[in-house]
Image: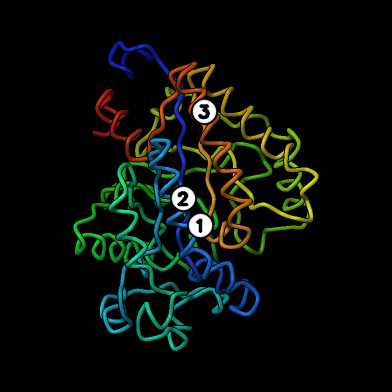
Amino acid sequence: MQQRLTGGKKERGRFIISLDFEINWGVRDQQTLDQYGTNLLGVRQAIPAMLELFQEFGLRVTWATVGLLFFSDKREMLAHLPNVQPQYSNPTLSPYLALDNVGANEAIDPYHFGHSLIEQIRRTPGQEIATHTFCHYYCLERGQTAESFRADLEAAVQVAQKQNITLRSLVFPRNQYNAQYLTICQDLGITSYRGNEESWIYKERNEEQQSLYKRGARLLDAYFNLSGPNCHALPKIAQQFPFNIPASRFLRPWSARLQALEELRLRRILSAMEHAARNNEVFHLWWHPHNFGVNIPQNMAVLRRIAEYYHYLKSTYRMESQSMGDLAAELHNCIPAIAS
């Protein structure tokens, strides 16, 4: 299997980064602009800083982007909404019921438009624009259906196509992976998605199923090894299509309150990266740009140390940086029977 995956070349570990790019569409049902607006505005400084670092270290990154961010103004946005929209049992989850709060354009409302940021990402080599669904769609919440999910993903594909972007990778909002929707993803051209870590701590669940106990376990796992390195073998990833490229680690934002544990957090990430490099596996790191929206110097310092360690692993073990789309294309070409 390994030889088929690599075309006879020496196998190597892979370093995948995916970002959930959503601005307020991803947090509007949990936090107000008064509570979290500073983080959201900080995205406009954090993204250029990240892009500069990615280019410096040759990091290829997947930007899973909410479709509503593609627009420059509200008139255009309203003209491209899907005809079938999710009817969540909890109506506060639907962004369509809050469109009156959206401003006229990106200059007036930097919380809900991202066209200029998408253009910056596109101009940076090695960056993949992927989808985080059109409206930050929740695939496990009561009231949503396969019909409304298909309409949502169709809208995301269409708005991207209008800007000459072909969507190949998907990240499920709130990590609400729904296996029943993979056929729809495949129908609409999606070749890979980010699945969840295998530990019970990270099992997909809707908002009603969340608990302080599980949230606390995930927080502890960021600093102490509760769930293992969460690295993934290529043959296992290649077993299904669209390809599941599971998450390995969420890069939590720098915290002054937890500053004493920073080295533990970083060591947790770097040791798992090395595990992947030594064992020819995949390490998949993810976060949201708004996680870097405050404490930008501190967050960028952490990211630089991760990038520097990737550079070491690349020179020592031939580890390779790939976007989700890169890895899916490689697997697709090496074992085309899986995708037929």
The image position of residue 34, as x and y in percent, is 63, 80
Q: Nearer the viewer, residue 312 or 102?
A: 312
Label 3 vs label 2: CA separation? Answer: 25 Å
Label 3 sits on a secondary structure element that is: strand
Residue at 37% across, 70% down: 68
Foreground label between 2 and 1: 2
Q: Is residue 79 left or right of residue 42?
A: left
| Mark 3 Cα shell of 10 Å, populated few (<14), some (14-19), many (≥20) | many
Above or below residue 73? Residue 124 is above
Residue type at tag 3? His
What sort of colour scheme is used for the picture? rainbow
- In contact (CB < 8 Å): disc 2 and disc 1: yes
- The residue closer to the viewer here, 42 or 249, is 42
**Residue at the extreme bottom:** 100
Front position in the image: 55 or 146: 55
| Cα gap from disc 1 to disc 3, whole angstroms | 24 Å
Residue at image location 41% in from the left, 85% down from the top: 103
Q: For this rendering, which residue is in front, 137 or 264?
A: 264
| Quarter of the figure with the C terminus | top left
| Kind of residue indicated by mark 2 | Met
Residue 4 percent coordinates (x, y):
31, 16
Element at label 1: helix
Q: Which residue carries the number 1 mark?
A: 289
Which residue is identified by label 3?
A: 232
Give the labeled residue for mark 2.
50
* Sequence-earlier tag: 3 or 2: 2
Name the amino acid, label 1: Pro
Mark closer to the chain start, 2 or 1: 2
- 293 sits left or right of 130 in the view: right
